[in-house]
Image (cartoon, rainbow, N blue to C red):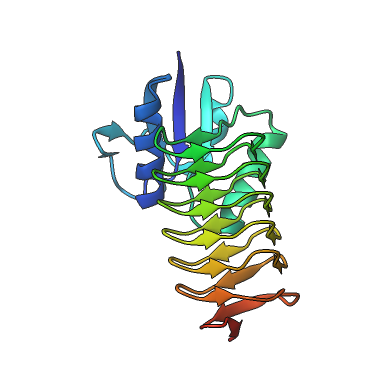
Amino acid sequence: MKDLVIIGAGGHGRVVADIAQKLGVYANIFFLDDGDIKETMGLPVVGKTFDAEKFIDKADLFVAIGNNQVRRDFNERLLKLGADIPTLIHPSANIGACVEIGLGSAVMAGTVVNPCSKLGKGVILNTCSSIDHDCVVGDYCHIAVGSHVAGTVKLGENVCVGAGAIIKNNVEVCANCVIGAGAVVVKNIIEEGTYIGVPAKRK
């Protein structure tokens, strides 16, 4: 069994560690974090984030940083260096047939991904969110707690869908957008920005 080094010991990192523990496929789990903490969840913090390269030949590396752009930059650098980056899926998640999930993605408890959807690299599907059939979710998106993406939706890269938001079926959202908590997207979004309200409008 390999070890797992999680980059980031904040809330997202702790949820990722919980998934990894439940999967039972790692001998040891460690954190790297730039704070002053020495351990969290009973798991040790063994260095700073810039120490990640030291572990490339020793362990799987997982970037557990919530900010989409920071996660992207870190993950892409590690991939270029040849790091082994897993995809971590909570045992209670329901993953349909013919679903593709990219490296470095985290799928949390209670999540549903229905058949023939494709998720890019470094995606976060947070607790009890759902992706319906035939969706495409771009690299480094974050689908927050309790949000729902209906069928045949296409999300560009670096999209953040806030807690409890809903995206109507057959809608496309361009890259680098933020969908506010509780917003309802009912038509295509073609301009970068933050969208809030029901129906969602650019802030």
- Residue 57 in the image, given as x and y percentages of width and height: 58, 20
Query: Is 201 located above or below residue 166 in the figure?
Result: below
Which part of the image, by quadrant, shows the N terminus? top left
Query: Is 55 located above or below residue 41 in the figure?
Result: above
Which part of the image, by quadrant, shows the C terminus? bottom right
Q: Residue at x 51, y 60 (%)?
A: 148
Q: Residue at x 67, y 50 (%)?
A: 139
Q: How many marks?
A: 0
Side of 201 relative to 175 (left or right): left
- Residue 127 in the image, given as x and y percentages of width and height: 40, 51
Residue 135 in view here: yes
Outermost residue to the left: 42
Q: Quadrant of residue 93?
A: top left
Outermost residue to the right: 190
Q: Nearer the viewer, residue 3 or 20?
A: 20
- Residue 51 in the image, given as x and y percentages of width and height: 50, 36
Side of 95 relative to 77 (left or right): left
Q: Quadrant of residue 149?
A: bottom right
- Residue 123 in the image, given as x and y percentages of width and height: 58, 48
Outermost residue to the top: 1
Residue 51 in view here: no
Q: Residue at x 31, y 48 (%)?
A: 36
Side of 64 relative to 38 (left or right): right
